[in-house]
């Protein structure tokens, strides 16, 4: 069986297993499997919970759970729970990325697909993006007509008020209890950092430590700050290129070229031929200014070192390399995110807290502008509101030891948000590292492992951060 086939069987098997779950106290039966490609053991199951936890009656939903047992001879009693980003990504469905994690040596790794994501009462909306129509990956993502139709379907099978982060973190604590762990360590990336902070607020007594990578605290009202953060990131790339003799020699007018590309695409779409990522067939697509804006932002999530070259090529009239990258990024994201769940979270937890008067201040002078915020506010005008505690908008305060990680060039959760979260966490350490969204590498792995081992940020050796570099800019072939 292929890796993809095993994922499908794991998620499918969870539903059947849920019948063995008792209501109180929470319990779960895990089945064992061996990953065919790595020979690594996994354990999988599902915890059945009430959709309406307060009522403790009515519809029940199954939460997909995957446990990757520790591989070392002396496993610690406190596992690492991984909280996925998005919002809308399902952690359990992406278990393969953790099979050979160094964090698994001493601890179980536990992946729970949050309610509303793949494997856990998926609130899927079919957004533009289809391999049969490559152009669709460049089409606008947040189409009101698409989401109105999706809402009509989802409301027949789910109470969309019940998919907030606080409710999901109560689910997570049920999983902890069902698996028999007294304390857990949390690792959250992007939106997963928000989820981890909410867990600290609601169930901090059961949290030993937390690692937050690409920090999105409560004050981060998604997507108000996206445009400014993306602008900051691209301007920093321009500055770094200007300070790099090799890059500056090849791209001496990069900011001006960027503005020229934007102006030309605003006037007329660029028709380009790209290679289909799945079939290898060459196809023609149209690259609009909006597709360029969105594509650049998502390319910057991973790789800023090729951005000067992509912009320069577009300036010279060759938009194909940029369009190819933009399609590849959209293809990897659009099929993985449960966008109904994204709206359930962001409409109530973020968009409702955005002051309309703040939109212009937050987006003026940016290459993206206000459209993403306005479009998401439009969707939220008809989307049901998740139920939230009265104190939800307050900063999370906790004495649990927390390691916060930020990338210098992060285009969505820049270091300011790690600083904001750390202000309310007296036992926290915030590291700013050369990188983009979700920093990693051997240095941060060593630091994170040491933090987990000692359970404190005190005397944590972080000196290797000084040696982390982003590498050379990608240049045209000579």
Image (spheres, grey):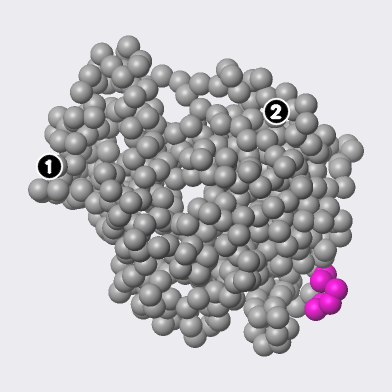
Res. 40 image quadrant: top right
- Hey, which residue is sitting farthest bottom in the picture? 58
* Direction from residue 460 to residue 142 in the image, left or right: left
**Residue 474: x and y, percent?**
35, 23
* Direction from residue 458 to residue 93 in the image, left or right: left
| Residue shown at 65% from the left, 84% from the top | 59
Distance of label 1 from label 2 (alpha carbons): 46 Å
| Residue shown at 41% from the left, 50% from the top | 225
Q: Which residue is mark 1?
A: 264
| Residue shown at 77% from the left, 56% from the top | 204
Q: Main secondary structure of the magenta part?
A: loop
User: Is residue 105 something that shows in the picture?
Assistant: no
Q: Which residue is mark 2?
A: 446
Q: Was residue 345 drawn as part of the magenta stretch in this picture?
A: no
Quadrant in which the C terminus appears: top left
Classify 357 as above or below 428. below
| Residue shown at 74% from the left, 40% from the top | 427
Dot 2: within a 10 Å radius of its alpha carbon, few (fewer than 14), some, or many (20 or more) residues?
some
């Amino acid at each position: 069986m292929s890796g993809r086939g095993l994922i499908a069987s794991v998620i499918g098997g969870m539903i059947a297993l849920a019948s063995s779950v008792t209501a109180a106290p929470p319990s779960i039966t895990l089945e064992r499997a061996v990953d065919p490609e790595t020979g690594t053991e996994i354990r999988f199951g599902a915890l059945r919970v009430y959709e309406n936890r307060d009522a403790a009656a009515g519809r029940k939903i199954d939460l997909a759970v995957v446990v990757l047992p520790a591989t070392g001879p002396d496993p610690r009693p406190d596992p690492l729970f991984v909280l996925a980003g998005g919002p809308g990504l399902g952690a359990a469905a992406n278990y393969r990325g953790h099979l050979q994690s160094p964090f698994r040596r001493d601890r179980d790794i536990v992946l729970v697909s949050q309610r509303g994501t793949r494997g856990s009462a998926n609130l899927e909306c079919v957004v533009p993006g289809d391999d049969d129509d490559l152009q669709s990956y460049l089409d606008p993502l947040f189409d009101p007509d698409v989401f109105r139709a999706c809402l009509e379907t989802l409301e027949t099978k789910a109470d969309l008020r019940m998919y907030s982060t606080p409710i999901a973190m109560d689910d997570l604590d049920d999983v902890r209890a069902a698996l028999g762990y007294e304390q857990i360590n949390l690792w959250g990336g992007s939106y997963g950092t928000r989820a981890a902070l909410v867990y600290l607020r609601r169930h901090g007594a059961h949290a030993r430590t937390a690692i937050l990578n690409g920090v999105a605290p409560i004050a981060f009202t998604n997507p108000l700050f996206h445009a400014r953060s993306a602008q900051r990131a691209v301007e920093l790339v321009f500055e770094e290129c200007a300070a790099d003799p090799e890059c500056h020699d090849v791209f001496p007018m990069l900011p001006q070229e960027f503005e020229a590309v934007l102006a030309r695409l605003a006037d007329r779409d660029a028709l380009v031929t790209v290679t289909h990522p799945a079939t290898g067939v060459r196809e023609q697509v149209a690259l609009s200014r909006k597709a360029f804006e969105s594509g650049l932002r998502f390319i910057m999530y991973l790789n800023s070192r090729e951005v000067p070259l992509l912009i320069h090529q577009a300036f010279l009239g060759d938009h194909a390399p940029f369009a190819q990258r933009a399609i590849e990024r959209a293809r990897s994201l659009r099929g993985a995110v449960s966008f109904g769940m994204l709206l359930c979270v962001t409409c109530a937890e973020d968009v409702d807290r955005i002051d309309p008067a703040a939109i212009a201040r937050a987006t003026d002078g940016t290459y993206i502008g206000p459209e993403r915020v306005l479009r998401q506010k439009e969707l939220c005008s008809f989307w049901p509101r998740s139920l939230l505690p009265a104190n939800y908008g307050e900063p999370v305060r906790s004495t649990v030891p927390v390691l916060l990680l930020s990338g210098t060039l992060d285009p969505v959760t820049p270091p300011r948000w790690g600083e904001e979260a750390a202000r309310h966490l007296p036992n926290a350490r915030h590291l700013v590292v050369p990188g983009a969204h979700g920093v990693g590498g051997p240095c941060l792995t060593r630091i994170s492992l040491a933090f987990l081992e000692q359970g404190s940020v005190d005397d944590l050796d972080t000196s290797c951060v000084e040696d982390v570099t982003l590498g050379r800019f990608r240049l045209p072939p000579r």
